[in-house]
Image: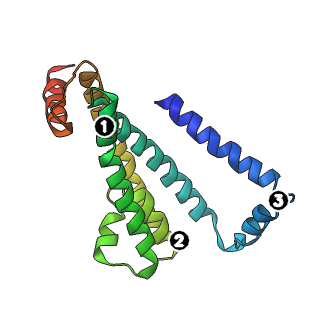
Amino acid sequence: MAALLAVQLGFYAVFAALAWMLRDHVPAISQLINGINWGAIGWPFVLSMLAFFAIGIISYTILAALCGSLVSNQEQAGMALQPVLYLGMIGYFAAINVSSGSGPILKVFSYIPFISPLVMPARFGVDQVGISAVLIAVIINVIFLAGFTWFSARAYRANVLVYSDSGLMNAFKKSLTLSKHTK
């Protein structure tokens, strides 16, 4: 999974470097880059975006691996990815709504793992929260990610040899039972 993640992040870096090198030769890229007010973007925002980007990519990758380990054949793969897609959609739509205000739901979503990497940078970008709230959200996400990674590794190890057509939730329950008995 780490190699897959490294390849994915490498592609992002290559495409960003290509866009930067072609900025003077391709008018669309030049207009996009020149349309950004680079002076208004500070280092705290850039660093928080990078932190949440890394946390989000790693979190969703581990969740996808865990969900993928719960299925026994390829036909069930779409069903296994539903939790990943739902969490991503909730975070995406919440982040879109940040510009229209800061209600209690958005405040709570800012600290919930899987949703926080999408919502908190948006709230920080429109000055709804300060750097201290961002740091608290990063700490919560990192602690959760460590525990979730440990849990997912145990569950993945238990799921590798489990083949069940009884559905995602039943496979997850069986996985929990098996992971308790493995060391």
- Estimate the x, y position of residue 32 in percent, counting from the top left: 72, 67
Circle 1 residue? 67
Q: How far apart are the alpha carbons under marks 3 and 2?
A: 28 Å
Does the residue at mark 1 contact the one at mark 3 (Cβ under 8 Å)?
A: no
Q: Residue at x 53, y 29 (%)?
A: 3
Residue under the image location 38 percent in, 61 percent down: 91
Dot 1 or dot 3, earlier in sequence? 3
Label 1 SS: helix
Amino acid type, callout 1: Cys
Q: Earlier in the sequence, mark 3 or mark 2?
A: 3
Q: Residue 73's quadrant in the figure?
A: top left
Instruction: Identify the mark nearer the N-term, 2 or 1.
Output: 1
- State the image coordinates of residue 7 (x, y, percent, origin top left): 58, 34
Q: Is mark 2 on a helix, strand or loop?
A: helix
Q: In this view, does 131 lie to the left or right of 73?
A: right
**57, 130: nearer the viewer:** 57
Residue at 48% in and 64% down: 121
Residue 77 sits in quarter: top left
Residue 113 seen from this side: no
Q: What's under tag 3, amino acid-wise?
A: Val
Instruction: Name the residue nearer the viewer: 148 or 61.
Output: 61
The kind of residue on which mark 2 rests is: Gly
Q: Name the residue under label 2.
A: 125
Crowding at mark 3 (Cα within 10 Å: few <14, some 14-19, many 20+): few
Residue beneath label 3, please? 26
**Residue with the most extreme right position:** 25
Up-down relation of residue 121 to residue 152 (above or below): below
Label 2 packing within 10 angstroms: few (<14), some (14-19), many (20+): many
Residue found 69% across the figure and 47% down from its top: 15
